[in-house]
């Protein structure tokens, strides 16, 4: 008997044996009885016919003529047979593992020779399609020309483009604007002018002296950076 007993669903024989101990008891009363029954504390030690079922693992009483049964019922017997068969299969699988299925390439391509060759032309074409798809001769020429160009200039090169970050650069990207056709005439243009003093008072009213000082300093510093 192993140190830890693993139980399965109790078989008919085990239930029959246990029921004689708990027949007239309520569920609450029966629980401790079943507990000690599972530990074997209630067994009649003189009765050699009481044993554990080798499948469900509960105690039961063997009524067979020669007291040679190992399981408490037919279901447990089936269960143990299934377990044995599974173990047998696992052992066999371990001893003769299934051979790995060969790929089409492995079966049709004699790759282990110095000059490998294909046994089956159809398979050869199917395989080569993966790496060299057929192209028209013009397309092939274009590809070769592109390769040659790349070799001459030392590899593929990215086209250079300077991206302006504040709009002050000499080089500006070309921008095309499509205007919507419309009959509307532009409105009158009004020119407004604010005196320097007016701007100063506006900022003084809006921001604190300290804030304006900081902003002035920041403007000077960023001007320095540009040069
Ligand atoms: Zn059983």
Image (cartoon, helix red, strand yellow):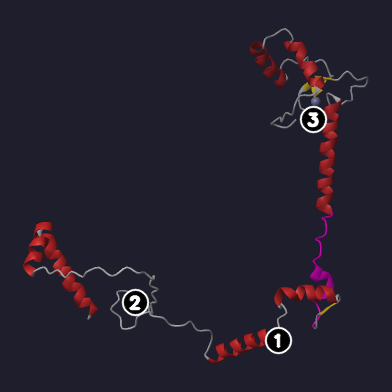
| Image side of residue 161 versus residue 101, left or right | left
Nearer to me, 208 or 87: 208
Residue at the spot 84% in from the left edge and 49% down from the top edge: 92
56 over 113 or under it: above or below:
above
The residue pinned by badge 3 equals: 55
| Image side of residue 113 versus residue 167, left or right | right
Nearer to me, 39 or 118: 118
Residue 17 sits in quarter: top right
Alpha-carbon span between mark 1 and mark 3: 74 Å
Q: Position of residue 19 (x, y in %)?
A: 76, 14
Q: Which residues are magenta?
A: 96-114
Ligand 1, image quadrant it occupies: top right
The residue pinned by badge 1 equals: 137
Residue at the spot 56% in from the left edge and 90% down from the top edge: 149
> Within 8 Å: ligand 1 and the Cβ of disc 3?
yes
Of label 1 and label 3, which has the lower sequence position? 3
Q: Residue furthest right?
A: 65
Chief SS of the magenta region: loop
SS for callout 1: helix
184 over 61 or under it: above or below:
below
Q: Is residue 52 part of the magenta span, yes or no?
A: no
150 over 64 or under it: above or below:
below
């Amino acid at each position: 008997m192993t140190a830890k007993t693993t139980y399965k669903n109790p078989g008919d024989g085990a239930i029959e044996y246990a029921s004689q101990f708990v027949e007239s008891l309520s569920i609450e009363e029966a629980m401790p009885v079943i507990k000690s029954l599972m530990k074997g504390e209630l067994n009649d030690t003189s009765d050699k016919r009481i044993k554990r079922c080798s499948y469900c693992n509960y105690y039961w009483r063997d009524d067979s003529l020669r007291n040679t049964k190992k399981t408490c019922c037919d279901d447990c017997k089936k269960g143990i047979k299934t377990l044995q068969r599974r173990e047998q299969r696992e052992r066999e699988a371990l001893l003769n593992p299934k051979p790995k299925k060969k790929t089409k390439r492995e079966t049709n391509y004699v790759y282990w020779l110095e000059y490998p060759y294909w046994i089956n032309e159809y398979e050869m074409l199917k395989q080569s399609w993966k790496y060299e798809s057929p192209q028209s001769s013009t397309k092939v020429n274009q590809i070769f020309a592109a390769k040659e160009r790349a070799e001459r200039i030392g590899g593929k090169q990215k086209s250079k483009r300077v991206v302006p970050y504040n709009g002050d650069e000499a080089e500006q990207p070309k921008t095309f604007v499509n205007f919507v056709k419309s009959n509307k005439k532009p409105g009158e243009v009004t020119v407004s002018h604010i005196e320097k003093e007016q701007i100063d008072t506006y900022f003084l009213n809006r921001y604190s002296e300290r804030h304006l000082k900081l902003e002035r300093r920041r403007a000077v510093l960023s001007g320095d950076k540009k040069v």
